[in-house]
Image (cartoon, rainbow, N blue to C red):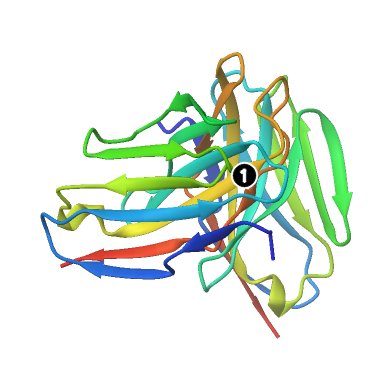
Amino acid sequence: KNEVEQSPQNLTAQEGEFITINCSYSVGISALHWLQQHPGGGIVSLFMLSSGKKKHGRLIATINIQEKHSSLHITASHPRDSAVYICAVEHWIIQGAQKLVFGQGTRLTINP
Amino acid sequence: DSGVTQTPKHLITATGQRVTLRCSPRSGDLSVYWYQQSLDQGLQFLIQYYNGEERAKGNILERFSAQQFPDLHSELNLSSLELGDSALYFCASSPRGHPLSGEQYFGPGTRLTVT
């Protein structure tokens, strides 16, 4: 079992729909990151969170530390949201050293 | 634009060769991370440097090495290249190494093709 599991692996929706992508992890973490990878390959950091909820525009990320679960929501989805969304958990190895462990990604396609 | 630059953008080389990938972090960021993204393995953490010192190692092969220079740019050296090393290599930077990492800013990546 992977340390970070995302679901679904692929998601196709119509423009305007509310989108939810889930991430579950199996070990204690210091933070969780949501990343967006565009079709051209570039990676953008969307959120870093260690508790609660964060919102940026139409994107909302939540995390439940006790349940080891995070969700990324997109409201009023648009074709330009089509991308791969990657969940990554952050571990502290030693003080001052951290590493990210990545989920396999969710490929989102929004049709007009 | 994240402010992180990587060169070259594309690199095609033959098995057995050695290449160097370069990364310049965002101005003021002290931490640099290297990641490998291959089709079968997804994104994997390779190594972290903080202010010139190696801080953490991930799944980095012995044939690979990295360093961070006094001006904070970093280089990833890949030697004795194999077909399986073909991948996208990303560099990311963040302001701190400790106590909290902060958000990471990714470069555009270097696509390495080994033939």
**Which picture quadrant has residue A57?**
bottom right
Q: Is residue B99 above or below residue A75?
A: above
Instruction: Report the number of discs.
Output: 1
Quarter of the image for the C terminus of chain B: give it: bottom left
Camera-side residue of B71 and A34: B71
Residue named by callout 1: B93
Query: x%, y% of residue B36?
Result: 40, 49
**A41 lies left or right of B17:** right
Dot 1 amino acid type:
Ser
Residue B90 in view, yes or no: yes
Camera-side residue of B25 and A93: B25
**B77 lies left or right of A41:** left
Query: x%, y% of residue A85?
Result: 60, 56
**Which picture quadrant has residue A110?**
bottom right
Residue A102 in view, yes or no: no
* Residue at 43% from the left image edge and 33% from the top image edge: A2
Q: Residue furthest top?
A: A94
Camera-side residue of A45 and B39: A45
Q: Is residue B114 above or below residue B85?
A: below
Query: x%, y% of residue B22?
Result: 44, 54
Q: Residue furthest bottom?
A: A112
Quarter of the image for the N terminus of chain B: give it: bottom right
Per the image, label 1 sits on a secondary structure element best described as strand
* Residue at 61% from the left image edge and 19% from the top image edge: A96
Q: Residue furthest left?
A: B16
* Residue at 81% from the left image edge and 28% from the top image edge: A51
**A26 lies left or right of B11:** right
Instruction: Mark 1: give few (<14), some (14-19) or many (20+) Cα within 10 Å.
Output: many
Query: x%, y% of residue A52?
Result: 85, 32
Q: Chain of mark 1?
A: B
